Each structure stands twice: as C-alpha cells, then as structure tokens.
Image (cartoon, rainbow, N blue to C red):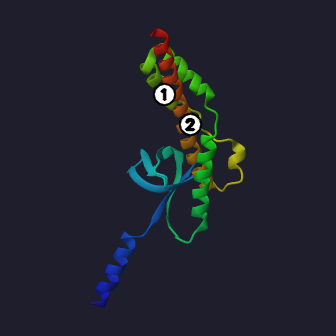
Amino acid sequence: MKKYNVIIILLFSVIFAEDIDILNLKNGDLIKGKIIENKINEYIRIELQGGSILTYTYDQIVSIEREEVNSNSSNSNDCNQSYQDGYMDGKSVLGGGYMLMGAGSGFLLGLIGTVVATTFCAAFINTEPPFHKLESLDKSCKTSYREGYRKGVKEKKIGSTLIGGMLGTVLVVVIIN
C-alpha cells in the first residue's frame, strides 16, 4: 500500500510541476514560456507569460531546455517588471506620423482608408526597443522587456492610426455636407 502511495505522489508531482520551457536561440536570446506546439525539425510555438505566442524554426534554435519554477525566485518578478517597463516605454513612443497617415487615408478613402492604413501600420511597425534600454538587463529580462515594448508600441501606433483615420473621415464628411 505504501508503494502505491509513493507512486501516486510522484505522478502528481510530475503532473502539477510548474516547468518552464527555454529556447536558446542562435542570436543569444533566451525565450522562456510554455511550448504549445512542436513540429519536429520544422518549428516550435511557445507561449510567453504575458500570453504572446512566438514561432521559431529549428534552424534558429541552439537548444531546448526545461526548468522547474521556483516560486520564491525574485528573477521572475524582475522580468515581470521588465515587461511592464517595456510596455510603458513602448506606449510613450510618438505616434504623430501614424496619426497623419491615418488622417490622410481616412480623408481620401473614408473608413476603407482607415482600415487599410491600420492594417498597413500593424504589418510594418518597427518595434525594436532602443539598445540603451536593454544593455543593463540579463538575457531573460531582455526578452520580457522586448515583448512589453513591442506590445506597447504596436498599441500606440495602431491607436494613433485609427484616431487619425477617423478624424480624416469625419473631416471629409463635414466638408461634403
């Protein structure tokens, strides 16, 4: 009976263990999250703590590791703060050029122009954070900061494009009437 209890305890500890998957990339980045799809010799999809899902091909990956989460680890909290810092820095990026692009598109093509400008904006946003913001962070926190920054920049620029497009559309409607 004791033997079965030990086996059950071991099984539950394996099932409920909070492990983190780590991708060591050739560019030196460490990507930490949960692998949600692994197509052997093709690609890996990994979900980051913030919910972002990234895809890497096998030729980008040096190694794949697994690490058990230590709930008392302060590094995890530091990296969460790095994500928030990156997000706030990304939201503070100027979006005036994107607002003008949206306004021009909205003025010329109305709501369709607004949608086109926003789609174009979402596809071609440069979301790489400034180097000086990353240089003091360790590798895993750099990744967290970068993800937060990308999300913040994307939200700011898409929002600016939408506002500009709506203003341009309203302006043309006012002029026509």
Looking at this rendering, what residue extends furthest in the bottom direction? 2
Residue in the image at 61% along x and 25% along y:
97
Crowd around label 1: few <14 · some 14–19 · many ≥20 (10 Å): many
Residue in the image at 57% along x and 62% along y:
76
Q: Horizontal and vertical percent for residue 29?
A: 59, 50
Amino acid type shown at disc 2? Lys
Residue in the image at 68% along x and 48% along y:
134
User: In terms of secondary structure, where does tag 1 sit?
Assistant: helix
Q: Horizontal and vertical percent for residue 17?
A: 42, 70
Asked if residue 141 is positioned above or below residue 121 in the image, the reply reads: below
Label ID, residue 156: 2
User: In terms of secondary structure, where does tag 2 sit?
Assistant: helix
Q: Horizontal and vertical percent for residue 129?
A: 64, 42
Q: In screen coordinates, is 95 left or right of 43?
A: right
Q: Horizontal and vertical percent for residue 173?
A: 46, 15
Label ID, residue 118: 1
Amino acid type shown at disc 1? Thr
